[in-house]
Each structure stands twice: as structure tokens, then as C-alpha cells.
Image (cartoon, rainbow, N blue to C red):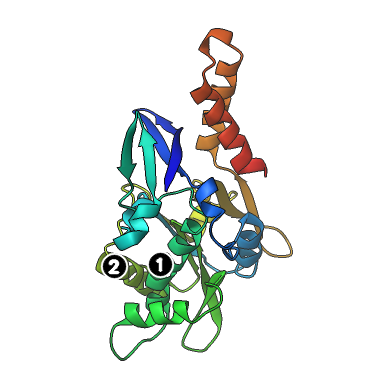
């Protein structure tokens, strides 16, 4: 089977494109995959509200080129052929653009996280977590963390390659982050360099005694504000993305500077933040 592909701009410095496998026609030959059960920004805000009056510790990390870390073997590879300049190439890794790719990525990443949150005492925790995912109708939307007293103390969110750990207990927080890192390493899952953020206590308060840092997750920066009735969770668009949007938007006003790449970058930021 032959499919087409296209490229979208990922960054300008250095100029890098993201290659997208166009599996639209290929996907019509498969059943419609189940909807991937994801948290969105309002879900994260609601969850953070339930811990807003406690000391929240946040750890965010990003898996590097997550789809392309997953190798495709056997006859499945024959589905992912593309033609370019009259030559045929075959994808050796899971391509973005096939209808089942998002669900596969979500399920595989959850196995490493579930193996970190569930007390598997016998055998390989990753293998048992994989079995749990296979036997479930859907991967979890998020995972609630509980302390030794059985009280909710945080949650973990996953959106494909973006992992967010939000905990109010420092001991559980450190243990959970260590376990996730260890299981990612065991499963040969590689983090993106420089993607990790750790934000603690006062760093989250926009009106706190220390400079406000907040934590960025899925393009949104979260924090807290003190109020008489208790702390309020606040959010704003990631300043770095807004600054990039301003620069790109200004270039659109220069007719000679407008390119398809520039238009794609600008539209991508708008769609990401406002849909």
C-alpha cells in the first residue's frame, strides 16, 4: 500500500520540519479506533483545584519523538510505504497520521506509568501493567495517587508524550518520579532533553514571596493565587508561545516575507490554543 506524506514546520532555530505520514486513505481500510481518553486543560485545572490549599509539587516531562520511538515489525511495515521522487520508502517506526497511532502511543506510555503507581509485588511490573492495559476497554484518563492513609494526594496526567505528575506529598512525589524514570529507562523510552520541569510550593503562587515560575503543561502555564476563601488555580497561555505567535503574526504583515511555512506555524499555534 502506498501513502503520501507531508512536512510541517517544527522550529526555525535550527530550521527543522516534522514529517507527517498521510494515512488518511490507509485508515479507511480499518475500523474506526476508539476515542483516546485524554485530559484537557479544564480537567487539569479542576483536578488542581481539589489540591489548591495544599503544597503542590509538579513534575512535567516530554518523551522525545514518542511516535517514532516505537518500532514496527513484521508485515505491519508493509502498510507504511510512501513514494517520494519516484522511489518507494517504508517506515520502520510508528508513523504519525495513521488512525491507530495515537491510541497505541497512549497505551504504551501508560504501561510505564501504571507500573510505577501500582504495587506489583510479584514478577515484572511492566509486563503486568501491559496485561492490565490489554484487558481494559480504555486506558485511564488520569491516575489518582493516594498516601498510606488512603487519602488522595495527587494525580498523574498523560497526553501521548506529555507526562504531568501533581502531588502534595514530597515523599510520594520523589518516589513516583523516580519510579517513572526507572520504568521509562527499562522500557527504552527516551525523554526529550531539557523538557523536564519541577515546580514546588511557593513557585506556583503568582502573588507569592518568591518569583512566580508556574508549570507549563500542554502549552498552558498553571499556578495559584491566594484569596480569602482559599487558593484559586490560575492559568495563562505559555508566554514563550505567545511571544512566538507575536513574532510570526508580525511577519504575516510583510507580503514579501509570507511563506507556506510561516502560515503553517502561525495557524498551528492558533489552533493549539483556541480550539
Q: Quadrant of the C terminus?
A: top right
Q: Residue at x 56, y 77 (%)?
A: 137
Report the residue marked by disc 1: 108
Measured in 3D between alpha carbons, the distance from the residue under mark 2 to the one under mark 1, in whole angstroms, is 10 Å
| Residue 231 appears left or right of 178 | right
- Residue 156 vs residue 256, the one in the foreground: 256
Q: Is residue 45 above or below residue 146?
A: above
Q: Tell whether 231 sits left or right of 153.
A: right
Q: Nearer the viewer, residue 176 or 110?
A: 110
Position of residue 121 in the picture relative to residue 131 (left or right): left
In this view of the protein, which residue sits in the foreground, 99 or 167?
A: 99
Dividing the picture into quarters, in which one does residue 258 lie? top right
Looking at the picture, how far across and down is residue 260, in whole percent? 52, 22
For the residues bearing labels 2 and 1, Cβ distance under 8 angstroms? yes
The residue that mark 2 highlights is 187
Could you say which disc has been placed on residue 93 in the image? none
Name above or below for residue 89 compared with residue 140. above
The residue furthest top is 256
Residue found at the far bottom of this picture = 122
* Element on which disc 1 rests: helix
* Side of 74 relative to 101 (left or right): left
First of labels 2, 1 by sequence position:
1
Mark 1, other Cα within 10 Å: few <14 / some 14–19 / many ≥20: some
Q: Position of residue 75 (x, y in %)?
A: 33, 60
User: Which residue appears at 55% of the width and 17% of the height?
Assistant: 251
Between 73 and 208, which is closer to the camera in this rendering? 73
Amino acid at each position: 500500500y502506498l501513502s503520501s506524506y507531508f512536512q510541517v514546520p517544527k522550529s526555525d532555530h535550527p530550521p527543522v520540519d516534522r514529517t507527517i505520514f498521510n494515512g488518511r486513505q490507509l485508515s479507511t481500510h480499518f475500523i474506526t479506533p476508539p476515542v483516546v481518553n485524554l485530559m484537557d486543560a479544564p480537567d487539569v485545572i479542576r483536578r488542581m483545584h481539589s489540591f489548591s490549599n495544599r503544597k503542590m509539587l509538579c513534575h512535567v516531562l516530554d518523551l522525545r519523538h514518542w511516535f517514532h520511538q516505537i518500532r514496527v515489525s513484521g508485515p505491519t511495515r508493509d502498510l507504511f510505504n510512501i513514494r517520494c521522487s519516484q522511489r518507494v520508502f517504508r517506515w520502520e517506526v510508528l508513523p504519525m497520521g495513521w488512525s491507530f497511532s495515537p491510541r497505541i502511543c497512549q497505551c504504551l506510555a501508560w504501561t510505564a506509568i501504571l507500573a510505577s503507581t501500582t504495587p506489583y509485588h510479584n514478577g515484572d511490573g511492566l509486563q503486568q501493567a501491559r496485561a492490565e492495559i490489554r484487558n481494559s476497554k480504555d486506558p485511564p484518563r488520569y491516575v489518582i495517587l493516594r498516601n498510606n492513609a488512603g487519602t488522595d494526594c495527587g494525580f498523574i496526567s498523560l497526553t501521548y508524550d506529555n507526562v504531568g505528575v501533581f502531588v502534595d506529598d514530597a515523599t510520594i512525589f520523589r518516589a513516583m518520579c523516580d519510579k517513572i524514570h526507572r520504568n521509562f529507562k527499562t522500557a527504552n523510552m527516551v525523554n526529550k532533553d531539557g523538557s523536564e520541569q519541577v515546580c514546588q510550593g511557593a513557585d506556583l503562587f503568582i502573588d507569592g514571596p518568591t518569583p512566580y515560575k508556574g508549570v507549563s503543561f500542554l502549552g498552558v502555564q498553571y499556578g495559584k493565587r491566594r484569596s480569602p476563601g482559599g487558593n484559586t488555580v490560575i492559568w495563562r497561555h505559555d508566554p514563550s508561545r505567545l511571544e512566538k505567535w507575536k513574532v510570526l503574526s508580525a511577519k504575516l504583515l510583510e507580503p514579501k516575507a509570507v511563506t507556506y511555512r510561516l502560515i503553517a506555524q502561525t495557524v498551528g499555534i492558533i489552533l493549539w490554543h483556541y480550539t
